[in-house]
Image: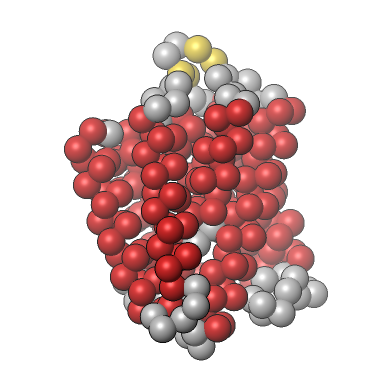
Amino acid sequence: MNNEIYKRIFSSFLLIPFSVFFIVKGSFFFIFFLLICFLITSYEWYMMSKKKKFFLIGYIFLSFSFYSVIELRNNFPGEYFYLLLITTICVATDMGGYIFGKTFKGPKLTKISPNKTYSGMIGSFFLSIISSSIFINNFDLIHKKIEFTIEIFFIVLLVSAVSQIGDIVISYFKRLSKIKNTGKIIPGHGGLLDRIDGMIFAFPFSYIILSLNPLI
C-alpha cells in the first residue's frame, strides 16, 4: 500500500472512535459535534460552489441531511443503533471501495470520478455487508439480540449503493468547480465533505426508508 492509503486508514482510525463517542453520548455533546461538522461542511461547499447555479440547492440538501442524522439518533427506537449502523455501512463502503479499487484496479466505473472502478464497487458492497453483519450480531439492543436478516441484507446493499452514488455526485460537483478536494482538514481524505460525501446522501435516504419500514 502507498503512503496515501496509510494516511487514509490512519485518519479513519482516529475519526471513527471520536465520532462514535459523540453519537453514543448524545444530548448536548452530539448536537455540538454535529453543528461543528455542519459548519465545516457548509464552508467547504461554499468555497466549492460559490457563484455556481447549484450553490443554494446544496445548502438545502445539507440541511436536510444533517436534520436526518438528528432524527436517526434521537427519534428512532434503539437510541443510537440506526445511526451507528448507517455510519458503519458508509465507512465500510468507503474503505472497501478504496482498498479493493487500489488493489485490483480494473475497468473504470464512470468518467465522472476516474478513480472509481468496478472492483472498488464490489469491494464496497462486500465490506459493508461484512462490517454491518459483525456490528448487528454483536449489538445487544436493550438485552435483545438482533439478527442479520435478509431484509437487513438488502437495506445494507441499498444504503451502500446510495453512499457510492453520493460519492460520485460530489465528485461531479468538484469537477465542475475544477478542484480535487473540498479542503485539507483530514490527511488522506482532503476536506470533511470529501470524507462524508457518501454519508450526506445515505443518511436522508435511510431516514426515509427506515421511517416507512423500521428494522426494530
Q: Is residue 160 left or right of residue 5?
A: right
User: Residue 155: x, y in percent?
Assistant: 66, 37
Residue name at image x 71 percent, y 28 percent: 151
Q: Classify 51 as above or below 92.
A: below
188 lies above or below 212: below
- Quadrant in the picture for residue 110: bottom right
Query: In the rendered image, which quarter contains the N terminus?
Result: bottom right
- Quadrant where the C terminus sits is top right
Looking at the image, residue 77 sits to the left or right of residue 186; the answer is right
- Residue 20 vs residue 37, the one in the foreground: 37
- 10, 73: nearer the viewer: 73
In this rendering, would 18 be left or right of 55? left
Determine if residue 188 is in view. no
- Colour scheme of the rendered structure: secondary structure
Q: Quadrant of residue 208?
A: top right
Q: Position of residue 120 (x, y in %)?
A: 69, 63
User: Residue 178 location, x and y as percent?
Assistant: 51, 88
Name above or below for residue 74 compared with residue 5: above
Residue 140, how many percent across, how many down?
A: 47, 19
Name which residue lies at 80% across and 74% down.
107
Q: Residue furthest bottom?
A: 178
Residue at (45, 21) in percent of width and height: 77
Quadrant location of residue 62? Answer: bottom left
Residue 29 can be seen, yes or no: yes
Residue ranking furthest to the right: 107
